[in-house]
Every structure is written in C-alpha cells, then in structure tokens.
Image (tube, grey):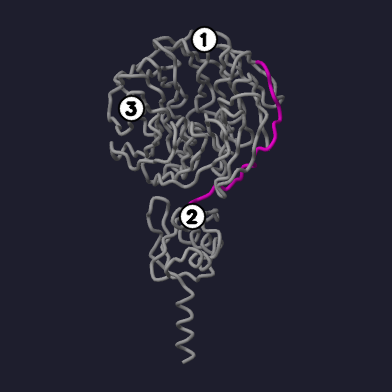
Amino acid sequence: MEVEEEQRETTTNKVMCLLTDPDGTPLGAAMYLPQNAGHQQLQQMVNKLLSNEEKLPYAFYISNQELLVPLGTYLEKNKVSVEKVLSIVYQPQAIFRIRPVNRCSSTISGHTEAVLSVAFSPDGKHLASGSGDTTVRLWDLNTQTPLFTCTGHKNWVLCIAWSPDGKHLVSGSKAGELQCWDPKTGKPSGNPLTGHKKWITGISWEPAHLNAPCRRFVSASKDGDARIWDVSLRKCIICLSGHTLAVTCVKWGGDGVIYTGSQDCTIKVWETTQGKLIKELKGHGHWVNSLALSTEYVLRTGAFDHTGKHYSSPEEMKKVALERYNKMKGNGPERLVSGSDDFTMFLWEPSVSKHPKTRMTGHQQLVNHVYFSPDGQWVASASFDKSVKLWNGTTGKFVAAFRGHVGPVYQISWSADSRLLLSGSKDSTLKVWDIRTHKLKQDLPGHADEVYAVDWSPDGEKVASGGKDRVLKLWMG
C-alpha cells in the first residue's frame, strides 16, 4: 500500500515539459520534470542538452510569460492542467550586463537650431549629430565637448549614418544632397552627392560582412527614389525607381537586398547588382513610416562588439562581421517589421514569402518608429498614442505596453544586452523601460523641449539625446 502511495506521489509531483527554442524547434523529447524545478534547474538542463562548454544564461517563457517561480507554483497560480504537455521556450540572454543610465553627465551646446538626429559610431567611441542649423557635429566623448563642426549643407540635416567599419559618416539634407565626411578630421570627403530632387528621408550602409572596406550606401528620398552610392567613386551607381510616392525609410539587409518603405503603402525588395525589383510586400492601408530588421544591431556594428576589440585589416573585419551575423541570425530567415500611419505593424520574412507572417495591432495612433532588440527576440514600437509597445520578435505577438509619456513618442533605442529600452518624446523626457518587469526603470527629464532623437551607444555605456532645445545631452549609468 505504501509503495503504491509513493509511486503516485512521485508522478503527481512531476510535470511533462517540452523545451523549445524561440522558433518552436524542440530541444529533445518531452520529459517529466519535478514541480519544484525552477529557473536554475532549467538553465542547467538546457546547457547540458545543448552541450555548451561555457555555461550560458537563459530566460524561460510559458505562453509569452517569463517563468520566475518553480513550475508547481506557476501551474497552481495559472490553473494549468498537469495532464497536458507544458511547452517552455528558452531564450539565450546576453552574457554581459548594461547598467541603466540614470543621470545626465553633460549638456553640450553648439548647435544653433534643433538637433534632428544623433548617432554613435559602431564601436561606440564617437558621436555625431545633425541639426536644423545645416551642420553635422562630431563630439569628443572623453572630454564631452564639441570636436568638429562639419559645414557644407545648405539646408537642415535630416539624417546621418555611420558606415559599419566606422570609417565614414554620411549625412542627408532637406535640399536632397548627401555629404560624406571623414570622422577623423571632420572634413568632407569629396563634393556633395547630388541626384535626389527632394529631401533625404533615410540612409543605410551595405553590411560589413558583405563588403569590406565599406563603400556603398543607399539613400531614400521624398522624391520617390532610392539611390545606391559608392563613396570611392563618389557617385550614384544605381537608382531604385518604382515607388509612386515618397520613400520614407530604407534598410540594407544582411542577405544583400535593400528594403524600401513608402507613402504608396508598399515595401519593395531590391537586388543590388542591377537594382532590379525582387518582391513587393503589400498589406498596409496607409503610409509606411519605419522599417526594422531582426539583424539590425549586428549590421550596424559589423565587427565591433562589447569587448571593444579593434581590427588591423578590412579582410579580418569582414570575417568577424560575417561570424557575428551568422551567429545572430541562426537558422531562421532575416525578419522585417514595418510600422505605419494605419496604426498597425506587420512582421515579414521576405526571403520566405511576400505575405506577412503576422499583423500587429494595438496602437491607437500612427506608428512612428519600430526597432528590433539586438538579440532579435523583441520588437519595440513607438507611437503618437504616447505609448511604447513590446512584441515577440519571432511570432509578432503582443507582450506589453509601456505607458508614462504624456506626448507622442518619436524615437526608441535598445541597450546592447536587450534588457532595457529607451524612448524619447515630445513631452521633453527620456524614459528607460525594463524589458523583464515591463516597468519604468528610469525617468530622465532635463530637456527644455521636445526630444527628437535618441541613441544608446553600441558598447552600452552612454546615451545621447537631442531635440528642439538645441543642446546635446549625454547620459551615463
């Protein structure tokens, strides 16, 4: 009698679980786990099953909810039947941790009109900004003072972009001109690049793992065209024509194709040897405002990672960039998210299908900016409805809404470890959100007016912001 009792005891205290990766691929067969098993035991098990020589950190999710208590407690709390197989998703976490920024370390004046864009270099050591005063400025991050003022544009500087090898900075203006700068001297590399008939809306560089040293970038314009430029030849080599209205955003993908989003409600996919149109992604009912790639962080940083290692040759850089890209991308396709004036977003896998994987709804106003976390596990979206929303980066399912801003949210940026999200708003504040708890981690007031631009340095150490009050602010942990 006692033996039977004991056997029943052992099975009732266990639960049948199936571990899967974020894409749904099972890790081994389903197995019985004790109900008192928690995060630590699951972590040991996953490391063992994956034969990781170095033990890696993981987070675990059941139905999109992070498991922070033992299995038994979770089952009881959520009234989950023990009869069914419990699916547990494991997600790799960054080995390093980024400190949340919590103070303004300096307020640097210099620009005489609004700061419209800020961008850290791929290694996080340099910072550039573009302004309505027609200049691009480079800042010395060690002394936190102005380094170079780059003059030459005749109108507002609307966007700036660093090449992934850090050797070039390109800016685009309201007059439709582009200018390449040498970040070491602040001097222009050659004459302005002309061809666009209206203002520049976006710039994206060819990834370093496809071509090193970096030479080609693509620009998008209000004139309806995107153009591919070569900085060595100093000219436009291909014009991508086909959109019937303004091109609002552009991304050069890791597979070598270019994605353009437009006010004609479509996203077009182009190959880059002749500029042929490969695919059209349709679904939005209004302007496409923003595009994000799941691999964006590794594309932006190329060969540079949080260790700060520098490279001696372009070949070595290309090799390391390719390793980082392949590791980040894994076996799945590169994913794309689009945000629109129709209040919705779509998740696409363009190399697999021209139809969206999921439609992401919930925002009550236009979606201004979408951005994948560096590890590709999350998508964040900023909207004129004053909220920032968090979504699952693989499935597109809604996860959480971050509320606290009292004005439209203009731009967002991620910490390198994907654990924190930064937002800048018309309400003059920056806010840091905790991805794990879904709560506000830090409120950063200080700007005197609307915050148009924010960036978190790829090395995770600092945040830069700029806006209507003309100053550049640096924030530290």
Q: Residues within 10 Å of mark 2 (few under 14, many from 20)?
A: few
- Magenta segment range? 91-110
As drawn, the label of residue 65 is: 2
Vertical relation: 80 (above or below) 231? below
Callouts 1 and 2 close, C-beta under 8 Å: no
Quadrant in the picture for the C terminus:
top right
As drawn, the label of residue 319 is: none
What is the quadrant of residue 402 in the picture? top right
As drawn, the label of residue 265 is: 3
Q: Residues within 10 Å of mark 1 (few under 14, many from 20)?
A: some
Q: Residue at x 30, y 40 (%)?
A: 352
Q: Nearer the viewer, mark 3 or mark 1?
A: 3
- Mark 1 secondary-structure assignment: loop
Question: Is residue 456 in the magenta section?
Answer: no
Res. 54 in view: yes
Callouts 3 and 2 close, C-beta under 8 Å: no
Q: Earlier in the sequence, mark 3 or mark 2?
A: 2
Q: Residue at x 45, y 44 (%)?
A: 391
Q: Earlier in the sequence, mark 1 or mark 2?
A: 2
User: Which residue is tagged 1?
Assistant: 155
